[in-house]
């Protein structure tokens, strides 16, 4: 009888040990799955940001064209309702880009900063190192420069 009890206790001990191993394995698998889900969400977020950035970069030349058209149109034609409609499309495009957190880089009359500006020419002036003219607007998206502003700076 004593032998039977001892055998049953040994069996019970082995069952408890197996149970603990299975539980630990299940807990590791569960933790791995949670970590995988987090990594996958991060990866998907990066893909979405990359795609949004690519889309924004494709829209910027179109926006440049609208801005150039507005700047080069004589004042008497700016009152035309068709031209106003065209400018409205440009404004809507700016709003669309804003919804993607795309912001224009302020450059005119700012100190030259190689992180935000790309020099295309140097001009004469009183304040060396300042941006004298913006040739092409620069843009940031979610705090990252996606296109630097092309500028003319005052010579040193």
Image (tube, rainbow, N blue to C red):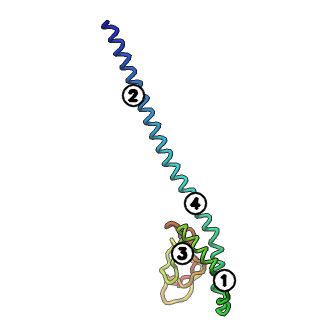
Which residue matches tag 4?
A: 50
Q: CA distance from mark 4 to mark 1?
A: 30 Å
Residue 11 locus on image (x, y percent): 38, 16
As drawn, which residue projects farthest toward the bottom?
A: 76
Q: Locate residue 99 relative to residue 15 in the image: left or right.
A: right
Q: Secondary structure at mark 2?
A: helix
- Disc 1: CA contacts within 10 A as few (<14), some (14-19) or many (>=20): some
As drawn, which residue projects farthest toward the top?
A: 1
Q: Nearer the viewer, mark 2 or mark 3?
A: 2
Q: Secondary structure at mark 4?
A: helix
Q: Which badge, 3 or 4, comes first in the chain's sequence? A: 4
Q: CA distance from mark 3 to mark 4?
A: 18 Å
- Disc 2: CA contacts within 10 A as few (<14), some (14-19) or many (>=20): few
Q: Nearer the viewer, residue 66 or 136?
A: 66
Residue 126 locus on image (x, y percent): 49, 90
Which residue matches tag 2?
A: 20
Residue 129 locus on image (x, y percent): 49, 82
Q: Secondary structure at mark 3?
A: strand
Mark carried by residue 104: 3
């Amino acid at each position: 009888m004593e032998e039977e009890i001892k055998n049953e206790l040994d069996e019970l001990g082995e069952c408890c040990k197996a149970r603990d191993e299975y539980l630990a394995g299940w807990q590791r698998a569960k933790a791995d799955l949670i970590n995988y889900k987090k990594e996958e969400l991060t990866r998907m977020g990066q893909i979405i940001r990359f795609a949004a950035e690519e889309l924004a970069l494709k829209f910027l030349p179109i926006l440049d064209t609208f801005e150039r058209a507005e700047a080069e149109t004589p004042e008497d034609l700016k009152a035309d309702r068709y031209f106003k409609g065209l400018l409205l499309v440009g404004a809507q495009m700016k709003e669309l880009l804003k919804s993607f957190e795309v912001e224009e880089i302020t450059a005119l009359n700012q100190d030259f900063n190689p992180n935000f500006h790309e020099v295309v020419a140097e001009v004469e002036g009183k304040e060396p190192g300042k941006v004298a003219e913006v040739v092409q607007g620069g843009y940031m998206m979610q705090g990252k420069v996606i296109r630097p502003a092309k500028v003319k700076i005052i010579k040193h």
